[in-house]
Image (cartoon, grey):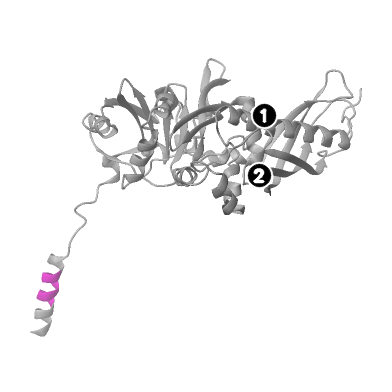
């Protein structure tokens, strides 16, 4: 009798247990990978990139005929209105938890809505602080429709996973929402957002392919958009990153009339020191590199290579700094360096988080080449003429 009562009680309790009634089946949802935001004629235009995880899960290299993503677009007086217009045109629930990046157009950056746009993504309960942030002067829809070369998965693209680029070259430092907020909230209240462009440097036997490239930065402050710095004008920024960076410089060999040399540089340390005298501040910069020479023509010495590296890196650091000054931008965040080192002086000098900077504010740039590696052999040609 007791066993029967226990069985009845157990069954009754089982019936009271809740099930996963509110769980959505994965195959019955759409997954957002990237979002683009434009602003024209006092209206938001949003672009939603939806990917097919069913094909991505099969292989990193996909069937050439498969569709990796579809891009929807809609306009609205607010971003939310535009998104709801897109919701009405699709068949399944949209899941935001896999969103990895968003792109702001030049018009969106220039409008007063740029910071509120970023704030909107932070408030959405399904998005994360690790979302990568970009800006562009090219059509957003075209960027979102580009697939990686050799038909690799979109989840392996440079926009979805920009850290993969750093192993070979760290020309432009990627930034996610978390670091973007930190840089806007701390002196100098400016953030450099990577600039995405479209180029056609790849092709098969029958057609050319478009690919994305990071070619500069757009500088956004809490008060508005400052402008773009790109191509050769921004090259110095890679040597002033806090993290280790890798890149190249090319210079003419002075002992030759027409031969050039490209050297791989690995930045292994950076020190920015504010020097305060009579309530004025200047900055001394020290950067240390390892260099690798992969190929050259003619004879060249390690001393000549060192000298050219020092000259070229100094020139690039100065050029990017001066380009920032033209836009009233503290491109190397020198204001933050003083804030960290001497907050009392910073308070006396700052205006809205920034200290006044001139071309002479960087008083010294010390470039040290720790070692020059000639590769497998020595500083002479492998094949002699």
* Side (left or right) of 18 relative to 306: left
**Residue 71, position as x, y percentages in the image:** 35, 27
From the viewer's perspective, is residue 26 above or below residue 171?
below
Q: Nearer the viewer, residue 69 or 373?
A: 373
Tell me the chief SS of the magenta region. Answer: helix
What kind of element bears circle 2? strand
Name the residue nearer the viewer: 91 or 373. 373
Image quarter of the C terminus: top right
Of the two numbered discs 1 and 2 in the rendering, the one whose residue sits closer to the viewer: 2
- Number of residues whose C-alpha sits closer than 10 Å to that of mark 1, classed few (under 14), some (14–19) or many (20 or more): some
Range drawn in magenta: 7-13
Query: Which one is nearer the viewer's eye here, 157 or 135?
Result: 135
Residue that carries the numbered disc 1 in the rendered image: 319
Q: Quadrant of residue 320?
A: top right
Question: Can residue 84 be spotted in the picture?
Answer: yes
Q: Which residue is mark 2?
A: 281
Q: Position of residue 1 (x, y in %)?
A: 7, 84
């Amino acid at each position: 009798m007791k066993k029967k009562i226990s069985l009845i009680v157990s069954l009754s309790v089982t019936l009271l247990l809740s099930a996963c009634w509110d769980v959505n089946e994965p195959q019955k949802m759409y997954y957002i990978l990237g979002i683009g935001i434009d602003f024209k004629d006092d209206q938001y235009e949003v672009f939603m990139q939806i990917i097919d995880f069913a094909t991505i899960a099969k292989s990193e290299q996909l069937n050439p005929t498969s569709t990796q993503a579809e891009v929807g677009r809609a306009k609205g007086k607010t971003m939310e209105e535009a998104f709801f217009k897109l919701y009405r045109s699709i068949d399944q629930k949209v899941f935001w938890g896999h969103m990895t990046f968003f792109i702001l157009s030049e018009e969106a950056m220039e409008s007063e809505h740029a910071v509120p746009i970023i704030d909107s993504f932070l408030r959405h309960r399904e998005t994360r602080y690790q979302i990568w942030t970009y800006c562009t002067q090219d059509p957003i829809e075209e960027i979102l429709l580009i697939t990686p070369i050799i038909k690799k998965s979109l989840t392996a693209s440079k926009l979805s996973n920009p850290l993969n680029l750093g192993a070979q070259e760290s020309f432009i430092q990627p930034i996610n929402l978390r670091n973007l907020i930190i840089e806007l909230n701390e002196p100098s209240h400016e953030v450099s957002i990577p600039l995405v462009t479209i180029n056609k440097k790849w092709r098969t036997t029958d057609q050319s392919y478009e690919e994305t490239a990071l070619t500069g930065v757009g500088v956004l402050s809490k008060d508005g958009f400052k402008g773009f710095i790109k191509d050769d004008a921004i090259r110095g920024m890679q040597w002033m990153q806090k993290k280790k960076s890798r890149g190249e410089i090319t210079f003419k060999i002075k002992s030759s009339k027409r031969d050039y040399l490209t050297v791989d540089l690995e930045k292994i340390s950076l020190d920015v020191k504010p020097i305060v005298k009579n309530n004025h501040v200047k900055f001394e910069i020290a950067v240390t590199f390892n260099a690798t020479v992969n190929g050259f023509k003619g004879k060249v010495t390690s001393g000549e290579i060192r000298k050219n590296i020092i000259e070229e890196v100094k020139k690039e650091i100065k050029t990017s700094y001066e380009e920032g000054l033209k836009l009233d931008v503290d491109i190397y965040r020198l204001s933050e360096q003083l804030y960290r080192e001497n907050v009392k002086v910073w308070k006396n000098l700052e205006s809205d988080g920034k200290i006044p900077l001139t071309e002479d504010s960087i008083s010294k740039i010390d470039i040290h080449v720790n070692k020059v590696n000639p590769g497998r052999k020595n500083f002479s040609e492998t094949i002699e003429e």
